[in-house]
C-alpha cells in the first residue's frame, strides 16, 4: 500500500456535482493498493497514519499525532503508475478493484476516515497546511 498524506486545514470530495465528504483540520490521505497487500498491511498503515507526528505542538514544532482531528481518504490507484517505458503510465502495479476496495474500506474504517467514492471520478479540493506532504509505502 502507498499513502500520500497531506496535512490540511480542510478538504472535500465531490462526485458528479455532489459533495460526498468534507473535513476541517486534519489529514487528506490518497491511498493506493498493490496486488499483494492484505488486511495486516492495511491495519499497519492506518495505525502509522494515525501516529504520524505532523501537527504543531505548543512550541510550534511538528510533534503531535492526529488526535481528534479528521481524516479524508481517497482511493488512488495512480500512486502505482509506472512510467519507466514511455510517457503513458501503466497501472499494472495497482490491485484490481475486487482486491483494492475491501482493503481501502478496512483502512478507512480503522482510521475513522471519511471517504471518497471508490472507483468514481472525483474532484478533490484541499487547503494545504504547511505544506506538509509525506509518502508512506508499506
Image (cartoon, helix red, strand yellow):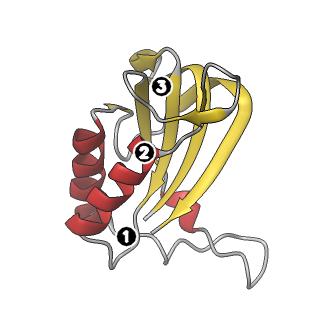
Residue 51 - label: 2
Disc 3 or 1, which lies upstream in sequence? 3
- Structural distance between the alpha carbons of marks 3 and 1: 22 Å
Relative to residue 20, is residue 96 depicted above or below? Answer: below
The residue to which callout 3 is attached is 13
Relative to residue 110, is residue 90 depicted above or below? Answer: below
The residue to which callout 1 is attached is 95
* Secondary structure found at label 3: strand
User: Residue drawn at (27%, 33%), measured in percent from left and top?
Assistant: 112
For this view, does 22 lie left or right of residue 41? right
Q: Nearer the viewer, residue 60 or 26?
A: 60
Disc 2 or 1, which lies upstream in sequence? 2
Which quadrant is home to the C terminus?
bottom left
Residue 105 image point, x, y percent: 24, 47
Disc 3 or 2, which lies upstream in sequence? 3
For this view, does 131 lie left or right of residue 89? right
Residue 126 image point, x, y percent: 62, 24
For this view, does 67 lie left or right of residue 5? left
Q: Quadrant of residue 128?
A: top right
Amino acid at each position: 500500500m502507498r499513502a500520500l498524506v497531506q496535512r490540511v486545514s480542510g478538504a472535500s470530495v465531490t462526485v458528479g456535482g455532489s459533495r460526498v465528504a468534507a473535513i476541517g483540520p486534519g489529514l487528506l490521505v490518497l491511498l493506493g493498493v498493490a496486488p499483494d497487500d492484505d488486511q495486516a498491511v492495511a491495519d499497519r498503515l492506518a495505525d502509522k497514519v494515525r501516529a504520524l507526528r505532523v501537527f504543531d505542538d505548543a512550541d510550534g514544532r511538528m510533534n503531535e499525532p492526529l488526535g481528534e482531528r479528521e481524516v479524508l481518504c481517497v482511493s488512488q490507484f495512480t500512486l502505482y503508475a509506472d512510467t519507466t517505458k514511455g510517457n503513458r503510465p501503466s497501472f499494472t502495479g495497482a490491485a484490481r478493484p475486487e482486491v483494492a476496495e475491501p482493503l481501502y474500506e478496512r483502512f478507512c474504517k480503522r482510521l475513522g476516515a471519511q471517504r471518497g467514492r471508490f472507483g468514481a471520478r472525483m474532484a478533490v479540493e484541499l487547503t494545504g497546511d504547511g505544506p506538509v506532504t509525506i509518502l508512506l509505502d508499506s
